[in-house]
Image (spheres, rainbow, N blue to C red):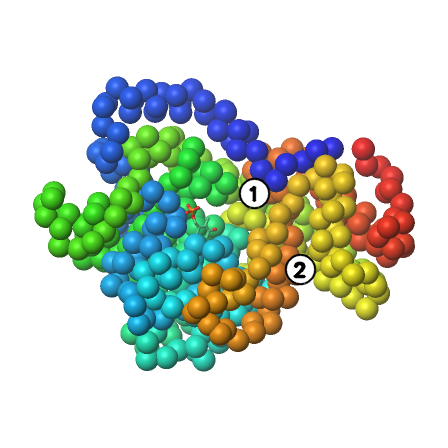
Amino acid sequence: MNVRLLDVRRQNLPLEQELAEAFKRVLHSGRYISGPEVESFEQASAAVAGARFGIGMSSGTDAILVALMALGIGPGDEVICPSFTFFATAGCIARVGARPVFADSCATSFNMRADDIEPLLTPRTRAIIPVHLYGQPADMDPILQIAHRHHLAVIEDAAQAFGAEYRGRPVGSMGDFGTVSFFPTKNLGALGDAGLLVTGDPALAEKARLLRDHGAHPRYFHSMIGGNFRLDALQAALLSVKLPHLSEYTAGRQRNACEYSRVLEGLKSGKVVEILTPAILPDRTHIANQYTLRVRRTEGWQWAETPRDSLRRWLQERGIASEIYYPVPLHQQECFRPFGPYPALPVCEALADEVLSLPVFAEMSSAELNAVSDAVSDFVYSASQLPPGQRRQPTGLA
Ligand SMILES: *Cc1c(COP(=O)(O)O)cnc(C)c1O
């Protein structure tokens, strides 16, 4: 059975009529930039993040960039972020002229740990960007304590975790800024690029709004250098149709993630390969933007290929898509070499070799879900029987 990593059409086509109506409304309004569609979506989406102010953005990346610009971070400054994250987190730090400083990650939650941040602090440190990776909040309280003690700003990169909560607080509401992405594959996906910046601070909100529009106030009078980071009225209108369904989308992903864990947890003790299911920590919600396994070798694994790559190929041969988020940690990326040298980060480096994300989108059928978990189970069984080249085709699969 073919299983895609994600099929955005299955989410969007059931809303075809409402989306078409939203398009028509914008078409007829003649208001394609800013205006009431953007404002009403900003209010509704900021509420999900538990924040007073929401500022629609052209992307999640631009939201991070504008947050850094609004905080006045630039050349000579350092910003601490995880190495095991999507490129944009650190790319934006470098784009404002600051130096990205990379922290190692927690091997069970995949998120940045406060203990790894402390040794990285220098007199030049200005901010910390925790990322709520795969949809599970980072351990914010100790991170916020460090920030408070050292007068550092905190920008939560909530691109993968819109709607998740940490100790009852929505992600995005805990830092000075929270940034959200509505890239089509995120839990709330637009029909193009879109993002959101949230904050509880009226002065920062005002500054971010100006930076979004070339820093002009009033128009053509520029007190700061901003850019064009605006959210389209059309994307705001389309997202307003989808926003009321966010909790259904999340519940669907969580249901699929639970089912995977139920089936795959028993495989943990393979003799040759060990499969670790993602840990869900008790004091937070995991919105399962990704369902990410760790595939680890044990003494019995005698082949050159990593067991993760071997599982990925095994799934592919059975028509099942999977993805590696992320194969190269950021401290090892060529483009950041001028900011280094960076010390080794053993957990991030191990994760880059071990992680594999399975299809978990809300609209998956149970047949698809079973096909994926059966294929993973068969891999573990088969790996303990024969070397990769001579594996038996497991029975029961098409
Ligand atoms: C998707 C993502 C972004 C960037 O969002 P875009 O809307 O694609 O620009 C930033 N950080 C993380 C962790 C992401 O997953």
Name the residue: 28% across, 41% down: 230
Name the residue: 70% across, 58% down: 295
Above-or-below relation of 393 to 107? above
The quadrant of the picture occupied by the N terminus is top right
Q: Is residue 356 visible?
A: yes
Point out residue 244 in the picture as x, y percentages from the top left corner. Answer: 40, 35
Q: CA distance from mark 2 to mark 1?
A: 22 Å
Point out residue 171 in the picture as x, y percentages from the top left corner. Answer: 40, 55
Quadrant in the picture for residue 10: top right
Disc 1 residue type? Arg
Name the residue: 61% across, 52% down: 324
Label for residue 86? none
Tell whether 247 sits left or right of 34: right
Point out residue 301 in the picture as x, y percentages from the top left corner. Answer: 81, 63
Establish whether ligand 1 lies closer than 8 Å to the Cβ of label 2.
no
Q: Quick one: label 2 or label 1, which is nearer the N terminus?
A: 1
Q: Is residue 152 visible?
A: no
The quadrant of the picture occupied by the C terminus is top right
**At numbered mark 1, what does the secondary structure look like: helix, strand or loop?**
helix
Disc 2 residue type? Glu
Q: Residues within 10 Å of mark 1 (few under 14, many from 20)?
A: many
Q: Residues within 10 Å of mark 2 (few under 14, many from 20)?
A: many
Tell whether 182 sits left or right of 2: left
Point out residue 22 in the picture as x, y percentages from the top left corner. Answer: 34, 24
Label for residue 354? 2
Residue hosting label 1:
253
Q: Nearer the viewer, residue 170 or 176?
A: 176
**At numbered mark 2, what does the secondary structure look like: helix, strand or loop?**
helix
Name the residue: 49% across, 37% down: 248
